[in-house]
Image (cartoon, grey):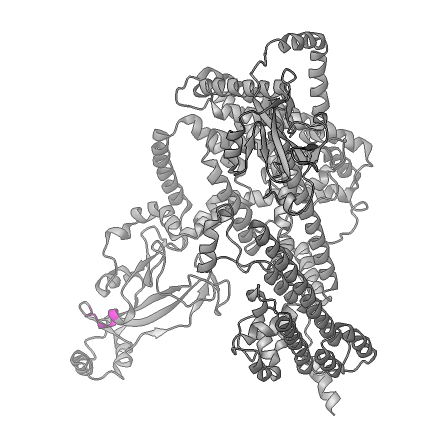
């Protein structure tokens, strides 16, 4: 019963597959033609009509090459009609093949497939669609965005490149029309319901692509933020690091600063500078050319000495309200206006590229982090290394108890702020090696002690849990010889090989071996060496459990061709199962 | 023909953009005209000038690295806290907190001192290493110091701002009076504050405020707060409540105006002037009688005098936003929509609110006073800035207030 159903399913699958292959080849060919027509040919209409009437995909290629030779202008309307026409012809093609091969097992695919076809549903049938042939641009427009029907096509084609739309449609046909929400992904029962109600967002390659494009432009600020955080953590901006530490300390002692500081940042970082820009404070201070002297904090915190110039730190940007700078500013702006937008575009392109690279780095970084977390979780939780995992459990347990008892006596403000200061001082590029070497010298002498300690610790734990045991079965199958009651050993198999067995029905040998020595236990288990292979004498029991209705004699179960008996063996679970 | 007209149009459309004046351009070399004595003195003072300039820049937060200045500020705060302990609620961490604060105070004090010393040492070292400054460089530095000091003076000169604001009410406000008021109110205000805030917090607050007062952000904050009428009202509260006018009726009437402005009246011989005054008058009974009297008893009036009084009512308006319409609503502490200038006993002038000219015209005049003109004569608007300082006759972006005078004369028999 199950065999028949599975075979039918596979057959229908193959049919669908071949159907898809044929259909999309045709659609693709016609699209390629249309693309070529857009770029080159004015006289492609005839070729197209020819190819569509013949319906042969091989035929379309010569026509394409022929059309590419000519190069004259073509009106957009004509061109669009051609595109629509080619689409329409392919859809007719597809329908024809569908009718001839009568692949009726997938009706939902055969009805709504390509552009023309989907629109044809509106006019309730294929044959009325000849009327649509003239007004092809209209319904193409309808298809891509539900605007007014007679909107000119040009704007639309600029928005959505043709191939994008095509890909989008392709994907939307290949995947189920409505994808379930993520939260429902695990429970299958709700999917159907959601599909019916139709409030599930649809997957679209175009939207995804455009979103990525927009994101890559807009992600700049996020990456800048990320970059500035990294700069702060690595002491590349020492005063910034110290300032953020001070602010962090403030937050630790008064969490209200979590609200206050962003507002402060908004008011004094955005609003007040805006006010000052509009109503300058009349502070015309003349900037100095040279500056002498340097700050202690810089020289202490910077890795290389005098890498920066103190003079540059001072007096460079704070004179924006002097008249000279305003003059320059205005000149620059006017020049920028005059210049062609080439440089701007170049800059923008570079920015997008940088953003894309950062995005790529971010995604790969996220993957690394996720992998690291996963491997840690797997290692610590799987008890592959019994000692290690036990130790982890023990330390974890102790920590829970200890921290719970300790928690009421902790002043979090001090702990957090002191921890942050220590951590960042530890992370300082110049202080880091010194701190490490300081602690290493302290631990040098302890190494021997540690070794002894470890040896001692090894005896702290004992792993003497009773391992799990189970029994395995193997069937010793005999084949009927020429004489009655003459049986010949056939093989050891893990299948009963009764008349209903699929292998037997397929007239194949069951998987098996000739010697018991070749029988291996299931993975993660090993044979009990103190146990021999034993013949199961309680035949009735395993026969009844399997629902077989065959004669039993002694330890054997008979059928017209074969007899078999069950051998059992005891297996013990390995201490370290394979992951 | 066509091309000609085109070029003409182009030349007409072409406009030229004026540029700002450069204040700090190239200057003639100073070496020849400066005596060597001054040059050498300036050269020796150069490091000191640099230190002073840097100190001023730090006070004004002109550094691009605001974080550094913020760290200095925090260090100063912690150092102050070392000397003036912060009052905290008792907790079981008190000893630890105390020790931490003391330690932080010492550390930050040491940090500040070391930073200062390091700066001076590195400054001297870098001066030794680099070539000596030219005279022009020293002068530029001097200018920079002067600019900063000028800005500081402008921003710290609260007195000037106060006086400017007072001008809205009193044309000439004596400094003594202003000082008395400030002193009185300041003291009361401080006593109230001191009751609720400990001296330590008070001192800290003033030191920190002093350190950030000259930042552009703080100045911008003050200006932005000054935009709110509530803030201005609070600021002028003291003046309002101490003004004599607040005990008097709000709008002056003719019967009050005439005695108050008696001093301005001119006395002329009656016989000569009265006929002229009465020449065109008709209608009213009392004028008719006057005319008859004049005709009959011309000789009897021979030695008597006629008092003539001109009343000037100021009409004031304020513009609350740039590019918006003029409003009759004015700030509560300044001169009101219609007011009249009155001389105080000490000679200063005060604007006192009065009824609008129409209202004054309809009122019955006190005994023996008669209008000379039938209507009020209005002058053109005079535009002035927010503090009523005159700008000119035309409305510009600068002008926020305007006023005009309505004149009418009276005579007393």
Q: Quadrant of the C terminus of chain A?
A: top right
Q: Is residue A495 above or below residue B354?
A: above
Q: Position of residue B48 (x, y in %)?
A: 69, 33
Asked if one can make out residue A238 in the rendered structure from this viewpoint, the answer is: no
Image check: B49 left or right of A149?
right
What is the span of residues highlighted in magenta in the rendered image?
Answer: B359-365
What x and y, as percent, mark residue A324?
A: 68, 55
Q: Quadrant of residue B60?
A: top right
| Nearer to the camera, A77 or A184 | A184
The image quarter containing residue B381 is: bottom left
- Marks counted in the figure total 0
Front residue (pair A289, A555) = A555
Residue located 70% across and 83% down the image: A75
Residue drawn at x 69%, y 36% is A483
**Depth check, front residue: B264 or A329:** A329
Q: Is residue A574 visible?
A: yes
Q: Nearer the viewer, residue B10 or A444?
A: A444
The x, y position of residue A159, in whole percent, is 63, 68
Q: Position of residue A66 (x, y in %)?
A: 82, 78
Instruction: Identify which residue is drawn at 60% across, 38% down.
Output: A559
Outermost residue, front side: A483
Residue sitting farthest toward the bottom: B1
- Tell me which corner region of the image, top left, top right, bottom left or bottom right, holds residue A498: top right
Q: In the rendered image of this protein, does residue A450 appear above or below residue A303?
A: above
Locate residue B336 relative to residue A532 in the image: left or right.
left
**Residue B297 falls within the magenta-colored stretch:** no
Q: Is residue B363 magenta?
A: yes
């Amino acid at each position: 019963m199950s065999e028949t159903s599975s075979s039918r399913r596979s057959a229908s699958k193959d049919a669908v597959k071949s159907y898809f292959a044929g259909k999309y080849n045709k659609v693709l060919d016609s699209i390629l033609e249309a693309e070529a027509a857009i770029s080159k040919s004015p006289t492609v209409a005839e070729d197209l009509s020819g190819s569509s009437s013949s319906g042969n995909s091989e035929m379309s290629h010569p026509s394409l090459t022929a059309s590419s030779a000519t190069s004259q202008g073509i009106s957009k309307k004509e061109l669009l009609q051609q595109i629509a026409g080619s689409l329409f012809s392919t859809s007719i093609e597809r329908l024809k093949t569908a009718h001839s091969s009568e692949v009726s097992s997938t009706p939902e695919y055969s009805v709504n497939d390509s552009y023309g076809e989907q629109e044809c549903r509106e006019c309730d049938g294929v044959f009325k669609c000849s009327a649509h042939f003239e007004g092809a641009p209209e319904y193409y427009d309808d298809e891509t965005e539900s605007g007014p029907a007679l909107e000119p096509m040009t704007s639309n084609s600029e928005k959505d490149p043709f191939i994008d739309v095509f890909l989008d449609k392709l994907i939307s046909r290949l995947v189920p029309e409505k994808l379930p929400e993520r939260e429902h992904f695990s429970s299958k029962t709700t999917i159907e319901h959601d599909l019916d109600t139709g409030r599930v967002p649809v997957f679209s390659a175009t939207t995804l692509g455009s979103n990525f494009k927009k994101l890559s432009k807009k992600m700049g600020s996020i990456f800048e933020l990320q970059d500035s955080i990294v700069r702060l953590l690595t002491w590349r901006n020492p005063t910034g690091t110290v300032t953020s530490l001070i602010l962090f300390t403030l937050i630790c002692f008064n969490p209200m600063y979590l609200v206050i500081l962003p507002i402060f940042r908004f008011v004094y970082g955005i609003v007040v500078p805006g006010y000052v820009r509009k109503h300058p404070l009349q502070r015309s201070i003349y900037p100095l050319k040279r500056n002498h002297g340097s700050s202690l904090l810089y020289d202490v915190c910077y890795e290389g000495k005098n890498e920066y110039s103190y003079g540059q730190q001072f007096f460079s940007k704070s004179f924006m309200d002097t008249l000279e700078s305003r003059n320059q500013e205005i000149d620059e702006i006017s020049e920028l206006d005059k210049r062609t937008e080439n440089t701007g575009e170049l800059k923008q392109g570079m920015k997008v590229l940088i953003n894309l690279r950062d995005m790529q780095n971010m995604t790969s970084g996220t993957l690394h982090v996720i992998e690291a977390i996963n491997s840690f979780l797997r290692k610590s939780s799987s008890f592959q290394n019994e000692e290690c995992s036990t130790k982890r459990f023990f330390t974890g347990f102790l920590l829970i108890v200890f921290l719970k008892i300790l928690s009421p006596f902790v002043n979090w403000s001090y702990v957090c702020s002191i921890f942050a200061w220590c951590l960042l001082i530890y992370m300082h590029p110049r202080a880091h090696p010194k701190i490490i070497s300081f602690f290493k010298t302290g631990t040098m002498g302890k190494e021997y002690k540690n070794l002894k300690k470890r040896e001692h610790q090894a005896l702290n734990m004992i792993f003497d849990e009773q391992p799990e045991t189970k029994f395995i079965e193997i069937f010793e199958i005999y084949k009927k010889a020429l004489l009655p009651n003459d049986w010949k050993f056939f093989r050891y198999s893990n299948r009963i090989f009764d008349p209903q067995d699929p292998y037997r029905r397929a007239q194949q040998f069951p998987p098996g071996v000739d010697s018991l020595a070749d029988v291996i236990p299931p993975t993660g288990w090993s044979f009990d060496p103190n146990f021999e292979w034993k013949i199961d004498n309680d035949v009735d029991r395993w026969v009844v459990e399997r629902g077989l209705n065959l004669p039993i004699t002694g330890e054997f179960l008979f059928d017209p061709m074969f007899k078999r008996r069950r051998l059992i063996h005891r297996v013990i679970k390995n201490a370290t199962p394979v992951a | 023909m066509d091309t000609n007209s085109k070029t003409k149009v182009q030349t007409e459309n072409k406009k030229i953009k004026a540029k700002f004046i450069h204040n700090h351009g190239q200057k003639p070399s100073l070496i020849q005209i400066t005596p060597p004595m001054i040059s050498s003195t300036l050269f020796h003072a150069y490091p000191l000038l640099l230190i002073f300039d840097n100190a001023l820049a730090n006070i004004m937060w002109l550094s691009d690295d605001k974080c550094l200045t913020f760290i200095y500020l925090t260090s100063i705060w912690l150092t102050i806290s070392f000397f003036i302990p912060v009052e905290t609620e008792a907790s079981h961490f008190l000893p630890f907190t105390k020790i931490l604060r003391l330690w932080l105070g010492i550390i930050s004090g040491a940090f500040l001192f070391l930073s200062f010393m390091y700066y001076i040492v590195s400054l001297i070292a870098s001066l030794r290493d680099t070539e000596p400054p030219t005279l022009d460089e020293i002068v530029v530095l001097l200018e920079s110091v002067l600019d900063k000091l000028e800005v500081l003076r402008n921003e710290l000169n609260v007195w000037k701002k106060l006086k400017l604001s007072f001008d809205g009410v009193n044309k000439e406000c004596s400094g003594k009076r202003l000082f008395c008021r400030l002193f009185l109110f300041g003291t009361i205000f401080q006593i109230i504050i001191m009751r609720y805030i400990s001296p330590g917090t008070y001192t800290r607050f003033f030191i920190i405020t002093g350190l950030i007062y000259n930042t552009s952000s703080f100045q911008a904050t003050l200006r932005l707060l000054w935009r709110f009428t509530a803030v201005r009202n609070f600021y002028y509260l003291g003046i309002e409540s101490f003004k004599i006018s607040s005990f008097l009726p709000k709008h002056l009437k003719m019967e009050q105006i005439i005695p108050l402005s008696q001093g301005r009246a001119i006395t002329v011989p009656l016989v000569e002037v009265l006929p002229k005054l009465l020449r065109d008058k008709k209608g009213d009974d009392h004028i008719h009688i006057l005319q008859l009297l004049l005709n009959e008893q011309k000789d009897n009036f021979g030695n008597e005098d006629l008092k003539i009084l001109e009343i000037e009512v100021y009409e004031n308006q304020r513009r609350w936003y740039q590019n918006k319409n003029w409003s009759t609503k004015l700030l509560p502490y300044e001169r009101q929509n219609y007011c009249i200038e009155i001389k105080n006993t000490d000679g200063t002038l005060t604007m006192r609110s009065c009824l609008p000219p129409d209202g004054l015209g309809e009122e019955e005049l006190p005994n023996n006073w008669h209008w000379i003109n039938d209507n009020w004569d209005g002058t053109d608007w005079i535009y002035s800035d927010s503090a009523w300082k005159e700008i000119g006759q035309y409305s510009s972006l600068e002008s926020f207030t305007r006023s005009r005078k309505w004149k009418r004369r009276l005579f007393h028999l």
